Image (spheres, grey):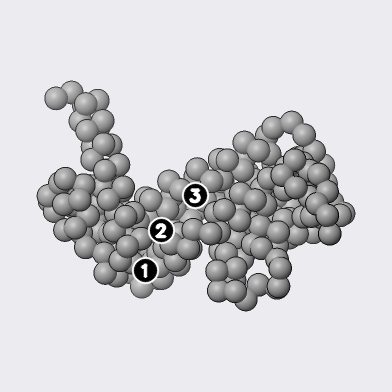
Amino acid sequence: MTRTNRKESQAQTRARLRSAARAEFARRGIAAASIDRISESAGFSRGAFYANYAGKHDLLLELMAEHQRREIAAWQDLLDTRGTLDEVLPVLRERFDAFARNAEDALFATELQIEALRNPDFAPRYRAFAQEIEARTLRLGEAFIARAGTSRVPAELLGKALQSFSPQLIAEARLGIAPAGLGAGERLVAIITELLGTGRNPQSRGPAGEENPA
C-alpha cells in the first residue's frame, strides 16, 4: 500500500469513527459513551480506535473542531460577499440561532473544557484547538470591521467577544434564562453592532433585510 493510500485509509477510518461517535455521544452523553460501541458501530476493533485516538475526548475534540471550523468558515464567506452589513447581520443571526438549537454541541464544548482543566495529558491538545479557534475568530473580527468600516474596539477584542459570548448566549437560550423574546442570534448581533458602533441594530429585519412588522 502506498503512503497516499495509507493516509486515505486512515482518513476514512477516522471519518467512520467520528460518525459513530457523534451518534453515541448524542444518545448517551460523554460519560456513558462506550469506546467499544463506537468502534463496533464504525465496523472496527477497539485496537483500531486506539490506533487513531488516545481516548473519546480526543475524538470529541476533533468532532468539535471540524464543526466549529465549518461554522466560522460559513460566517467568513458571508462577510466576504458583497453587500452591506445590515444585509449580512440578519442572515448571521438566523444561522447562529440554528447553531444554538443543537444542545449537544453546547454540552460537548463545556465537557471538553472541563476535561482539559482536569486532565494535564489532554490539556495541550485542547489548548491547540482553542488557539486555532481564537485565530479564526480574530479573522472574523477583522472581516466585521472591514465590512462595517468602523469599530469601537480592535479586531482582537471583537474576535474574543465572539468567542466568549457565543457559548454563554447559547446556554442562556437553552436554559430559558435569556431576556424574554430574545434569541441567542438576536443578542449576539446586538453585541456585535454595539462593539462596532454601527448605530441601529438590524435585529428586526428579515433574512433579506426587509423590515419585519412590530
85 up-or-down from 60: above or below: above
Q: Which mark is residue 68?
A: 3
Q: Which mark is residue 198?
A: none
Q: Is residue 123 left or right of residue 185?
A: left
Q: Give the residue type that dot 3 points to.
A: Gln
Place of residue 30 in the rendered image (x, y in percent of width and height, measured from the top left): 32, 66
Q: Earlier in the sequence, mark 2 or mark 3?
A: 3
Q: Give the residue type that dot 1 points to.
A: Glu
For label 2, the crowd category at 10 Å Cα-Cα, with few meaning under 14, some 14 to 19 and many 20 or more, is many
Q: Which residue is mark 1?
A: 115
Residue appearing at x 13%, y 53% in the figure = 46
Q: Which residue is mark 2?
A: 126
Asked if the residue at tag 2 contacts the one at tag 1, i.e. Cβ–Cβ closer than 8 Å, the answer is yes
Q: Quadrant of residue 77?
A: top right
Q: Is residue 202 left or right of residue 135?
A: right
Q: Which residue, as the protein is rendered here, is positioned at the far right? A: 199
